[in-house]
């Protein structure tokens, strides 16, 4: 079965809760999707670690996913920042672009409406439940299958979902039960799981102060 070819697209679909028929973890979803986009660029060799943050490598390849291309251009144009800063910076734009890209490609349906007739909102529905099911099966394979046979992209997906505590991918019990396994998968995502955790903690601390 054909699946989205980027980590942000896969994680967006996995954030959908089929029982509640809505996205879950939305408070942290924009952080997660930005971290996933950075991970994707790093895995493709378009970014490298430069001290505490990313630096662009080479020229932008033709046909690069628009979400990844925009982020790569931002990193080229702006001053050097840490991975944590890039996870948090302009993250809402990335989340909206991921959603719109999935809708344009036919993976999801987006129905826009207004809460109380005033505040814009959107209801997201996957068009083919089998796609999300296949992604869930890939997560299960990463957790249970031979470590040497786990796809690096699936390993990175699990590590990022764990960092964001995305319960539609990993429940609290699974995160505890498979802690050692998840830690072995985490290097596939480079520095981004740690940066994602720090960015979310910083947001929470700022909100509490």
Image (tube, grey):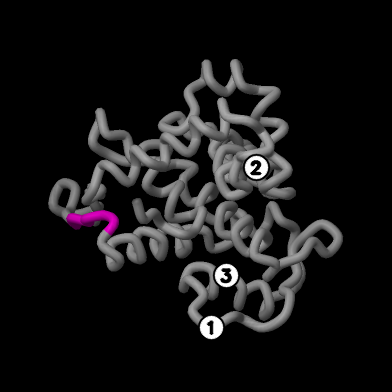
Q: Position of residue 79 (x, y in %)?
A: 74, 74
- Work out whether 149 lies above or below 8: above
Left or right: where 193 falls relative to 138: right
Which disc number belongs to residue 62?
A: 1
**Residue drawn 28% across the image and 62% down it:** 103
The image quarter containing residue 130 is top left
Q: CA distance from mark 3 to mark 1?
A: 15 Å
- Contact, mark 3 vs mark 1 (Cβ under 8 Å): no
Q: Nearer the viewer, residue 206 or 134?
A: 134
Pick whichever of labels 2 and 3 is earlier in the sequence: 3
Q: Earlier in the sequence, mark 3 or mark 1?
A: 1
- State yes or no: discs 2 and 3 in contact (Cβ < 8 Å): no
1 or 2: tag closer to the N-terminus:
1
Say which element carries label 2: helix
For the C terminus, the quadrant is: top right
Please give the name of the residue rendered at 39% of the width and 54% of the height, measured from the top-left corner: 3
User: Residue at label 2?
Assistant: 202
Residue found at the far left of this picture: 117
**Residue 143 image point, x, y percent:** 57, 29
Residue 194 lies in quadrant: top right
Give above or below for 56 relative to 84.
below
The residue that label 3 is drawn on is 71
Closer-to-camera residue (43/75): 43
Membership of 160 in magenta stretch: no
Q: Is residue 42 left or right of residue 68?
A: right
Few, some or many C-alpha atoms within 10 Å of disc 1 (few <14, some 14-19, many ≥20)? few
Q: Bounds of the magenta span?
A: 107-112
């Amino acid at each position: 079965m054909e699946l989205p070819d980027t980590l942000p697209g896969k994680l967006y679909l996995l954030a959908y809760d089929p029982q509640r028929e809505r996205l879950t973890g939305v408070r942290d979803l924009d952080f997660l999707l930005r971290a996933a986009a950075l991970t994707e660029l790093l895995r493709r060799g378009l970014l490298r670690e430069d001290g505490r943050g990313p630096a662009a490598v080479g020229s932008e390849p033709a046909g690069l996913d628009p979400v990844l291309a925009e982020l790569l251009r931002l990193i080229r144009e702006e001053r050097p920042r840490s991975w944590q800063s890039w996870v948090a910076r302009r993250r809402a734009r990335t989340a909206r672009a991921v959603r719109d890209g999935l809708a344009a490609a036919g993976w999801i349906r987006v129905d826009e409406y207004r809460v109380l007739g005033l505040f814009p909102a959107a209801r997201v529905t996957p068009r083919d439940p089998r796609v999300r099911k296949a992604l869930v099966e890939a997560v299960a394979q990463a957790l249970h299958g031979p470590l040497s046979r786990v796809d690096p992209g699936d390993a990175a997906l699990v590590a990022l979902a764990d960092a964001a505590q995305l319960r539609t991918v990993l429940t609290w019990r699974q995160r505890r039960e498979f802690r050692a396994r998840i830690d072995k998968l985490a290097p596939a995502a480079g520095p981004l799981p740690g940066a994602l955790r720090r960015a979310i903690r910083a947001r929470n601390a700022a909100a509490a102060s």
